[in-house]
Amino acid sequence: MSEQICVRCTIMRGGTSRAVFLSENHVPRDIEKRKHFILALFGSPDARQIDGLGGAEVLTSKCAIIGPSTRPDADVDYTFLQVGIADSTVSTEIICGNISSAVGPYAIEEGFVRWEEPITTVRVYNTNTDKIMLINVPVKDGHPLVEGDYVVDGVPGSGAEIQVDYSYTIGSSTGKLLPTDNVIDLIFIPSLNRNIEISIVDIATISAFFRAEDIGLTGIEKPNEITQEKIKVFEEIRQAVSDLCGLPKENFITPFTIAVAPSKSFKVFSTGKLVDAEEVDFVTRMTASGTIHKALSGAAASCVSVASQIPGTIVNQCTASVEQPRYIRVGHPSGVIKTYTDVASKNGEVMVNSVRFSRTARRIMEGYAYIRKSRL
């Protein structure tokens, strides 16, 4: 009797992330059994994930479960899982914009949606947020295009441009764009022994924004230059925001905590390339699972771009230009991400007409992975 089971899987890169894609029919439906299945597949918990498919960092320890849609207004159902590396967590909190971009070509290649040239729009129901998003994929001869001239900072070379529309993801965690109804809130940070101002916005993935200078940062530090003491402050902010919004805070990733500063020149941490201050509208640094993110997730970029167009928020105060609609250029450790944002105010109510960004994605591998039965 075999001591292992095999499962068909596909590895997709989406933007600056990589994920294992699984058919929902190949994954246990019971949540606890699914957790053990995914941990075994990824080789977690282990800092190197040496006995599985995990890539030993936040950007590559991701999973997407795809199946036929349970809703008439969508083509596929998509569940995103952030898999713990050195711990035994499998989180469904976030939507992951990078991996969302790969859902489009995957759905076309797997026959979940009828393709159209030159663009196929894939309607995706995200079970994490209970929201619909639209993925626009360039197609030729029935296949998603891979080659193109679109460049994503943090990804080598260029590829075909895939557009991700998050316009319908308002209130993904709290049901409201501004969870506290305020553009500025005060929270107490124990390690600082004082209050700081924050802005909380909930679209794509709920995020809390604060001035980098308020915790002693410039906003252009390389990931390895931000100390554990500073990362502790990010976590204290996350927990305080969770309390403020009535969200769970133990063993959770969100709300994202993002430090913001006015535009300034910085060097890309991996290549040393200089990004001039005039190339960005503001700069950011964010944490994910207790570490400084090496880029900026598509969901976080969408949220921070919307926040920049809401008068009075921390991000808005750090943004040089308030012209809209337009592409918001967000600086992050790997370079710049541009997000088209159209936000308007009517009778005192903030309305998001559009928020979308572009990524590249491609299928890297498909085949069978083997899982030790003893881990299940």
Image (cartoon, rainbow, N blue to C red):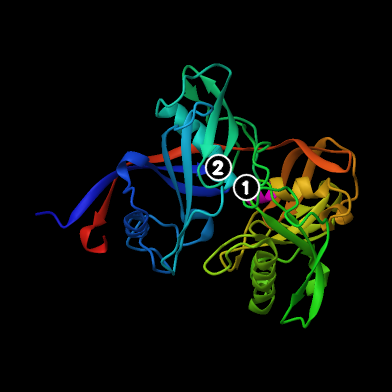
What's the residue type where badge 1 is placed? Answer: Ser
Estimate the x, y position of residue 133 in percent, counting from the top left: 59, 35
> How many labels, in total?
2
Residue 212 placement, left or right of 255? right
Q: Which residue is mark 2?
A: 130
What's the residue type where badge 2 is placed? Answer: Asp
Estimate the x, y position of residue 191 in percent, counting from the top left: 72, 82
Q: Which mark is residue 172?
A: 1
Say which of 58 and 30 sits in front.
Answer: 30
Estimate the x, y position of residue 318 in percent, counting from the top left: 86, 56
Measured Cα–Cα span from mark 2 to mark 1: 7 Å
Graded by Cα atoms within 10 Å as few (under 14), some (14 to 19) or many (20 or more), the crowding at tag 2 reads few
Residue 336: in sight, yes or no? no
Say which of 172 and 17 sits in front.
Answer: 172
Q: Which mark is residue 63?
A: none
The quarter of the picture where residue 270 lies is bottom right
Residue 80 placement, left or right of 275? left
Residue 222: in sight, yes or no? yes
Residue plotted at (31% across, 49% down): 28
Residue 371 placement, left or right of 196? left
| In the rendered image, the vertical position of residue 40 relative to residue 347, given as above or below | below
Q: Is residue 125 magenta?
A: no
Task: Answer whether labels 2 and 1 touch (C-beta < 8 Å).
Answer: yes
